[in-house]
Amino acid sequence: MGSFKLRLVTYFLLLALLPLLAASWAFSQVATKSEVGNTDSRLNAALRVAINDYSRRVRADLAGTASSLAHATSVQQAFQTRNRAALVRLARSVPDAGFYINNQLVAGEAPKGLHVERTSSVFAEDGALIGRIVVWFPLDGTLLSQLRAATGLAAPDRILLAQGGKVLAGPSDIVGTTVTPLPAPSYTNLGDSRYRAVSAPILESSPPLTLVVVTPTSAIDNSVSALRERFLIFAFLALAIVAILAWLLGRTIVRSLGELADAAGAVSRGQFGQRVPVRGRDELATLGRAFNEMSGQLAAERGRVQDAVDRFGKALAATHDPFMLLNVIVESAVEATGAAGGRLIVDGEEQARAGEPDEGGRPLVIPLGPEGKEDAMLLLTPAAADFGDQSRELALWLGSQASIALENVRLHRLVARQASTDGLTELANRREFEDSLANEISRAERFGGTLALILADLDNFKQVNDRFGHQAGDEVLRSFADILRETVRDIDVAARYGGEEFAILLPQTDIVGAEALAERLREAAESRAMAEAHDSPVTVTSSFGVASFPEAGTGPGLFAAADEALYRAKRAGKNCVVCAETNRPVRAPH
């Protein structure tokens, strides 16, 4: 009992586990997608803040400084008087600035490295261009640190500068690595690590300079793993609750099943009076009531079935005639099932009948042929509208016995056919031919009439075997047999008498008709390719000897006359038809 309860709990757990696994997979997908979406939103927000801060620095720090210097009176005077010393003093107070006269640097520093610059022109009072001021700052790690501080990004997020697919500024372990273009938030490999990244251009150049904000995918995976762990804890708690409930339910089911098993064991030992306690109205109670009803029906049916089986067994032991057995099976099936009547149909013809099969309900059709084919059928007509389940099963069992009997009949006929048929050509064999010859002679003697015999022999057949092989020889024999089947009548008997010699028995045919038929056979054989070997057709001629009854007065005499005619055909050069000499006596072989 404990084993069954364990299996029951296991089944419940499996039933609960499948949807939990599906939910876990779906939750993992949703959590991963959600975490990636949150990361993209956070990186995009940081990228916007960084770009705004960068734009502010360019606009206020560079453009504003350059414009203020260009409009300062002291700067204008220094440019107008070309006072280089004054410009040098001004350059010292303004780092990362250059003062140019006629495109020549006269004070300050020229821009260098990766940078961004803004230029402001200096004009004289009369509007003439007297110089220009270039203010710039480098695009390096210092700028990225300032932008990172403005965005509020925390470790492990990073800000990079990239141009032409290469990182130009950023953390030292990433500078110089290759980064793929990022038209949208996506994954990228930087060095040995994989990142989630967003980017936007900040400097119009060819190729453009882009600002990239990245975060390692390990951070995303860690967040998803934390969510997944919490979900798995919840799932295990749910499975534990399901297991407890299944265990409690299993105790009740096992008790009811134990009582049912005890009662079934008693019934199997023949104690049909055993009953199952019925409690409540659930499915187990319904099962108990059905079992009790079944026990009562089994007790009633047991006697009737036993009697029918006993009679059927005695009938099987009493006869070895298959056709008589069919009548016994039909009668036993009608009696055992309480049918109104029954019929046994073989190949569309009724072979056995019992009772009144034309009265009652719709017949039960039981196929009896090999592998359930309907060339043989047992039809049982119920006395009421239909058979009960037990009667139907009993009828099917008896039908299987009828099927075995019909199979025995089929095997008997097959053996009989094999005993009278040549295996290679499927013509009648020598034994069948001799029986047919004796029967036809007897019939002709009794009722009068004529009978003709043709003996045929394939010319030079041994050379066919020697030259082309025995397989080609067999094919020649089969082809000649096909010619005989195509030419003779249904009442004629064509046989392979032995080796390459054939015999054709022609009832109600005189020697003239037999000679004409033999000539047709000779022409057909001569004009047909009998086989194919070595990619060439094999042709064979044939010789024929013809004799008739009553010119030859006995069966052996008829055969001897035809054989003597065949011998003369061979001596005449083969490939011809020779008739027996009617006025010449021929001695029959002993």
Image (cartoon, rainbow, N blue to C red):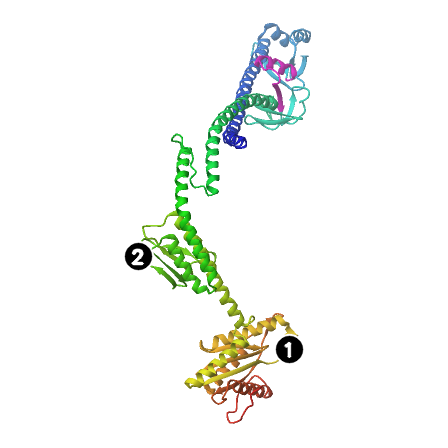
Give the image location of residue 561, x and y in percent: 54, 87
The one of 231 and 142 positioned closer to us in this rendering: 231
Give, as a three-letter code, the residue at label 1.
Gln
Give the image location of residue 507, x and y in percent: 45, 82
As helix, strand or loop, the secondary structure at mark 1 comes to helix
Please name the residue that numbered disc 1 is placed on: 463
* Number of marks drawn: 2
First of labels 1, 2 by sequence position: 2
Residue 359's tag is 2
456 is within the stretch colored magenta: no
Q: Is residue 346 left or right of residue 546?
A: left
Q: Residue furthest top?
A: 74
147 is within the stretch colored magenta: yes
Range shown magenta: 139-162
Give, as a three-letter code, the residue at label 2.
Glu
Q: Residues within 10 Å of mark 1 (few under 14, many from 20)?
A: few
* Residue found at x 44% / y 84%: 444
* Residue 291 seen in this snapshot: yes
